[in-house]
Amino acid sequence: MSRYTQKISVAALLATTLFTTNLTASSHREAPAITESPKVDATDFYMFNSYETGRTGYTTLIANYVPLQDPQGGPNYFAMDPDAVYDIHVDNNGDSVEDLTFRFRFSNTLEGGTGKTIEVDGKTLSIPLNALGAISASDSSNLGLKETYKVELIKGDRKTGTTSTLATSLTKPYDNVGKKTFPDYNAYANKYIHSVAMEGCSAGNMKVFVGQRKDPFVVNLGETFDLVNYVPVDRSFAPFATAGIEQLDSNDDLRAKNTTAIAIEVPTACLLSDTSKTTIGAWTTASLPQARILRAKGQFDKNSVQGGALTQVSRLSNPLVNEVVIGLKDKDLFNTSEPKDDAQFIDYVTNPTLPVILNALFLDAVNGVTGADFKQLNPTNYPRNDLVAAFLTGIEGVNKNGSVGEMLRLNTGIAATAKANQNAFGVAAGDLAGFPNGRRPGDDVVDLALRVVMGALCHPVAVDLDGSGTAGDAGDVLGLCATTDAVTGTVPYTDGAPVSAMYFNDTFPYLKAPLAGSPN
């Protein structure tokens, strides 16, 4: 790219951060209705150019489901819902409608129709556990419950497009019960990273993995939703460093939790509609049949009769949009909507509520500590037309491909950054391959979002936009708002729960193996 184009691109990428400014936790249990169906509750969505050695030219998409899994949560653990469909949608032509959908359908079966059995005084009985003995990469015969899945590719609209079957019976590894059941869980689970041919793709096979992983999101979850029960500022920032206010350094409330990942790695060329259109948008959804009738007598995997059209019940792209951007009355509506219809949520973008809430919670405390006379802590540039551009239209030069709606956008033309060189603050820190240009597991979207919601982008950013040779000087402003619009825009807001690329693997599926249920 020319230097002029690069400067526009950097500014545009930074501006896309704005839509995610209201984020303070992962999308676990984000809407009233989805709390009733945890197996179809999307928790996090990631999309990034693969940074595994030798995988240049591939894009990784990871959709996590089933929140807050306790590793010891037996005896049934966390199988996926066989009545649901789980989709990863890609818009590659900018019409705000999916052009490619990777669909996953799950099946649960018991060995011999009974699971593992044992003889008790001449009677053959089904045991109450899913396994009877140790399981390894070379021998899983002790496992009585088999979970498999089908992968479909839909080209065009998910309801009316052309569907092809990519794989019919791939195995999902059983959850990490514990060290006695799985002496080497890593070796066992890695056996189920599948290579799958993608119809119409001559660039190579895609990789597919579905299975339990350590929850990758790092967040001070409990305190955040207790009216932000901490001082959300880095303790090294004066005057808080000497104010006698308790600070917490590391508060990852998900550190002992697992999740279930649906991960695919696809040749980038096969995600694009045109090689000249390098930006794609993506989101994940889960859907259930409209009708459910409970059976009077329960039976394994046949406790209800499901029927009717598939109805979307979960939706996720950028983290926490539904949790802390969308108002309570519209959360369930957001989960059932599509990006093309997101203009209905415009008021939540032009007049975001979280910064006003933070102002109400902390204005008096900040004035008392600093001696300053702030009239308000939150930015004053209402309506937030900069958010409208990022939320509804995308930004010219990087992610504006005609799409309108909330989705995670990735410019696949920007090369991946190696794991060791990644910056957790992504584009804002000069790492153009990170959030909000897609999202990697090691991107600290919480701290970044807190800082942006309070006006960081009204001030010079740590990118040499003006070509002066110095990043972060007075010329490195985006022009989206004035510094006077954000009086606390330079404050290092944080939830006290840092994250780094070093927390994760540098090979597909990137997320760490799940925590063992025993010993724990």
Image (cartoon, grey):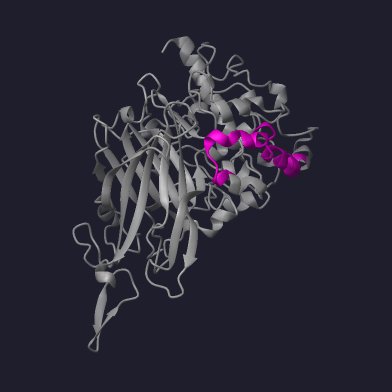
Q: Residue at x 36, y 39 (%)?
A: 154
**Region of the chain picked out in magenta, as a range:** 334-363
Residue 349, magenta (yes or no) = yes
Query: Is 359 positioned to the left or the right of 433 in the image?
Result: right
Q: Is residue 446 above or below residue 137?
A: above
Task: Tell which of 427 and 321 is nearer to you.
Answer: 321
| Image location (x, y in percent) of residue 51 | 34, 33
Comparing 117 with 214, the one in front is 117
The image quadrant where one finds the C terminus is: bottom left
Quarter of the rendering containing residue 504: top left
Residue 37 screen position, x and y as percent: 50, 58
Q: Dividing the picture into quarters, in which one does residue 393 lie?
A: top right
Q: Nearer the viewer, residue 239 or 476?
A: 476
For the point 43% across and 36% down, which residue is it?
157
Regarding residue 147, the answer to whether it shows in the image is yes
Task: Give left or right: position of 370 versus 23.
Answer: right
Residue situated furthest bottom in the rendering: 121
